[in-house]
Amino acid sequence: RASLNVSISEIITAVSVTFGAAAVGILIYKTFFSKSKCVKPKVNLDLQKDNLKVVHAFDIEDLGDEAVYCRCWRSKKETGDNVGPLIIKRKEA
């Protein structure tokens, strides 16, 4: 029957090396193989997705005296924030 002569310092060293290697492995995995690399959530989920950039431009002369644009394009019922409509008025001279 063989007996194991392992000191406490050898056990501590082995455990430290094991945890260190595991930590390095986890960091490498998260850095190179994880799919959640600081991906910013998309604001525009379904409006004109075929366009690279969605832009709406209006000629100021075509607007008349006042134009109101809804900025609640994610939900027409509840926006969940404090964003109100965009109101453009012609300044009275």
Image: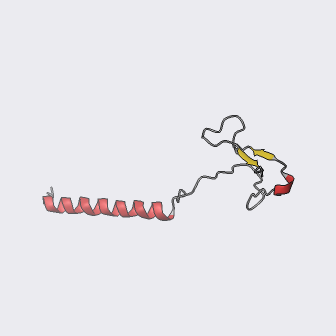
Q: Position of residue 56 (x, y in %)?
A: 78, 56
Q: Residue at x 73, y 49 (%)?
A: 46
Q: Is residue 5 visible?
A: no
Name the residue at the right extreme: 62
Q: Which percent across, then down, holds residue 50?
A: 78, 57
Residue 19: image quadrant is bottom left
Q: Residue at x 47, y 63 (%)?
A: 31
Q: Is residue 68 left or right of residue 16?
A: right
Residue 35 or residue 89, whichever sits in front: 89
- Residue that appears at 81% across and 56% down: 60
Q: Is residue 84 visible to us here?
A: yes
Instruction: Identify the colour scheme used.
Output: secondary structure
**Location of residue 59 with respect to 72 vertically, above or below:** below
Left or right: 62 in relation to 17: right
In the image shown, does 42 or 61 lie closer to the viewer? 61
Q: Residue at x 19, y 59 (%)?
A: 11
Count of numbered labels shown in the rendering: 0
Q: Nearer the viewer, residue 52 or 14?
A: 52
